Image (spheres, grey):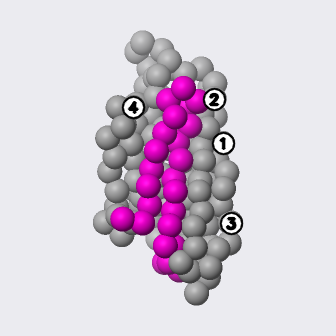
Amino acid sequence: QVQLVESGGGLVQAGGSLRLSCAASGIIISINAMGWYRQAPGKPRDLVADITSGGTTNYADSVKGRFTISRDNAKNTVYLQMDSLKPEDTAVYYCNARVRTSWYEVYDYWGQGTQVTVSS
């Protein structure tokens, strides 16, 4: 069993910054990709950014140049630094990790979600 615990959401004014963290714990052999998704009311859950174990990153066009994803492999933790926030960034943000729990088992796990609200 693997748990992802997120922290760092909250309310911020437009133009402000927030930093999200997500720590994975449990039976973990290794973690492949880790990422952040977000879901606004009435909309699907979309990828914000992800990062491989080797550090290769990928961003949604809407956040390029404003958000930075990073990870600490020793701590099984992924971060999302969000700068120049806009009201349209308001959503519940979910952490995702693709975890190898044994030599033949790889599963996707999700965090519980953290609310990010950007006021105009």
Marks 3, 2: nearer the viewer: 3
Badge 2, how many Cα within 10 Å: few under 14, some, many 20+? some
Could you tell which of marks 2 and 1 lies nearer the N-terminus?
1
Where is residue 116 shown, x and y percent of the image? 61, 67
Could you tell which of marks 1 and 4 lies nearer the N-terminus?
1
Q: Tell me if residue 39 comes above or below residue 68 in the rendering.
A: below
Could you tell which of marks 3 and 1 lies nearer the N-terminus?
1
Q: Secondary structure at mark 1?
A: strand
Tell me the kind of residue under disc 1: Val
Q: CA distance from mark 2 to mark 4?
A: 16 Å
Q: CA distance from mark 4 to mark 3?
A: 28 Å
The residue tagged 4 is 53
Could you tell which of marks 3 and 2 lies nearer the N-terminus?
3
Q: Residue at x 55, y 31 (%)?
A: 76
The quadrant holding residue 111 is: top right
Q: Tell me if residue 19 comes above or below residue 22 in the rendering.
A: below
The answer to whether residue 112 shows anywhere in this view is: no
The residue tagged 2 is 25
Tell me the kind of residue under disc 4: Ser
Q: Residue 60, labelled with which disc?
A: none
Q: Check contact, mark 2 vs mark 1: CB within 8 A.
A: yes
Tell me the kind of residue under disc 2: Ser
User: In screen coordinates, is 110 left or right of 100?
Assistant: right
Could you tell which of marks 4 and 3 lies nearer the N-terminus?
3
Badge 3, how many Cα within 10 Å: few under 14, some, many 20+? some
Q: CA distance from mark 1 to mark 4?
A: 19 Å
The residue tagged 3 is 10
Q: Which residues are magenta?
A: 65-88
Where is residue 109 shown, x and y percent of the image? 53, 38
Q: Residue at x 59, y 20 (%)?
A: 27
